[in-house]
Image: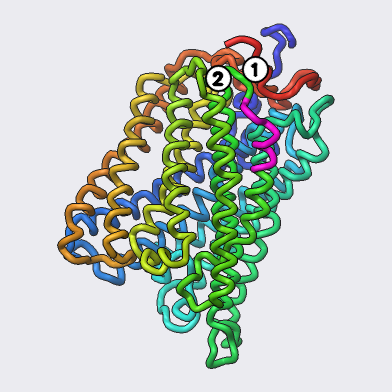
Amino acid sequence: MLPAEHAAPSYLTDGNTLRSWLVTHDHKRIAILYAVSITFFFFLGGIAAALIRLELATPAGDVMSADTYNKTFTFHGVVMVWFFLIPSIPTTLGNFLLPLMIGARDVAFPRLNLFSWYLYMAGGIFTVACLLLGGVDTGWTFYTPFSTMFSNSNVMLTVVGVFIVGFSSILTGLNFIVTIHTMRTTGMTWFRLPLFVWSMYGVSLVMLLATPVLAMTLALIAAERLLGVGIFDPALGGDPLLFQHFFWFYSHPAVYIMVLPAMGVVSELITAGVRRRIFGYRFMVYSIIGIAVIGFLVWGHHMFVAGQSMYASIVFSILSFIIAVPSAIKVFNWTATLYKGDIAFGAPMIYALGFVGLFMLGGLTGLFLAATALDVNLTDTYFVVAHFHYIMVGGSVMAYLGGIHFWWPKITGRMFSEAWARFAAILMFLGFNLTFFPQFLAGAEGMPRRYHQYPAEYGLLNVLSSAGAVLLAASYLLPIGYFLWSLRFGERAGNDPWGAEGLEWTTSSPPPTHNFEEPPVVTEGPYAYTHP
């Protein structure tokens, strides 16, 4: 390294104008642009969620009309799925860390990386415009024939927004795949890659292969809605089930676009928190690839009651049980890594352990929905809502925040308040369970989803759920406060404040524009901890 007085400027100080950020090709700055953008959309979707829970706090629909409620939960779903959950970890932590972890100066296509952010923002503008012009009421799944024939809301505006943001995902996935294949530093063989890099590789494959199907499906909605082409409408010679096959062929792999990066983050957090090699590294790698591949084969379990063939449902049910195996391997290996370890219960580790707990409960309840006989009774109830949120929100958001806390010193060069961070992590875990566990009970008792009023016997469970949402909102707001505080008053971070292993910890905090003064050389596998 160069002496401090001659060290290269950090990426944060290498140009301080707004223009220098908006035209940057530095993967780290682009990660910051994404982080600011998705935080905005997260809180926009969160406001919609707060309105939903406010409405459902009482059985009578006394806050919103049915139509307004439909538009509110549709906006919540569209924003949270496509503008937060899918891009959250890959575009922020992935963009920032991937080149650092493999010893590269940047991603393979820096200009394309910036262009993907502009596409993301363009899609967001269309979606926000939809809200301002009256909203859309189809649900985030855009089910036909309602979306193509009957809805009088701004369906096409929202479809265009999601269509555009899909290309942002495709370009990000392409960039990551080429970067991992061609830009690994000397000695960085495939089985010396950190598990976070493997998770980025797996999720990039899914982005690249699945997202075009979403784009095609949305284009077909436009063709039928605007041009009257008979694709899904049987009166015009279409197939009413075809839309669901197309949509879920993308949208179930999209679940793993959200979860695989979270698994990579948690693997890094656990091995650093216990300071030992990850148990069964190669099995962890194979399970990532297994999840990415099998994820393309289970879309039909969303359609057990839609009218598809009984034999197809049996096959999809079996495959849905099979995909639980690589997920279970990860949980077992994390547990074995922690076994008899001297665990440092810092904020990142608390978030990681929270992820494991919530992901396990979400995964186990997924087995209920994979069983065709049970699914007939649980479909379209709040059981499905709770299961989805345990995986997507409880799991992915917990891991995302854990990763932000873990790499915050590297990103900013500053430390945050550890006490407040631990409190926020615990509050999020408690608030999340209070919000969504009662929904399992309500769903098992038969409460349907997507209604703004409900029978009074479900009142207590919904009051608990709405009370939990208040705690959950507080746990999301707290990190904004102490992170902003740390930027000005936080203690300066060393290069490796956690004593972690990995190339990203060998460079300065925050890193220089080109990451490394000299290209690093890798001589051993990841997580080479030699002492507790």
User: Where 211 falls versus 275 (above or below)?
Assistant: below
Query: Label 2's element?
Result: loop
Q: Is residue 337 visible?
A: yes
Q: Are marks 2 and 1 in contact (CB under 8 Å)?
A: yes
Q: Is residue 20 visible?
A: no
Q: How is the image coloured?
A: rainbow
Q: Amino acid at mark 1?
A: Ser
Q: Which one is in front, 437 or 3?
A: 437
Residue in view at x 34 percent, y 55 percent: 48
- Determine which quarter of the picture holds residue 445: bottom left
- Image side of residue 118 versus residue 382, left or right: right
Label 2 crowding class (10 Å Cα cut-off): few <14, some 14-19, many 20+?
many
Q: Earlier in the sequence, mark 2 or mark 1?
A: 2
Residue in view at x 40 percent, y 23 percent: 485
Q: Which residues are magenta?
A: 278-287
- Location of the N terminus by quadrant is top right
> Residue 231, percent across and down?
60, 83
Residue on which the image places disc 1: 508
Residue in view at x 17 percent, y 53 percent: 460
> Residue 177, percent across and down?
75, 45
Q: Which mark is residue 413?
A: 2
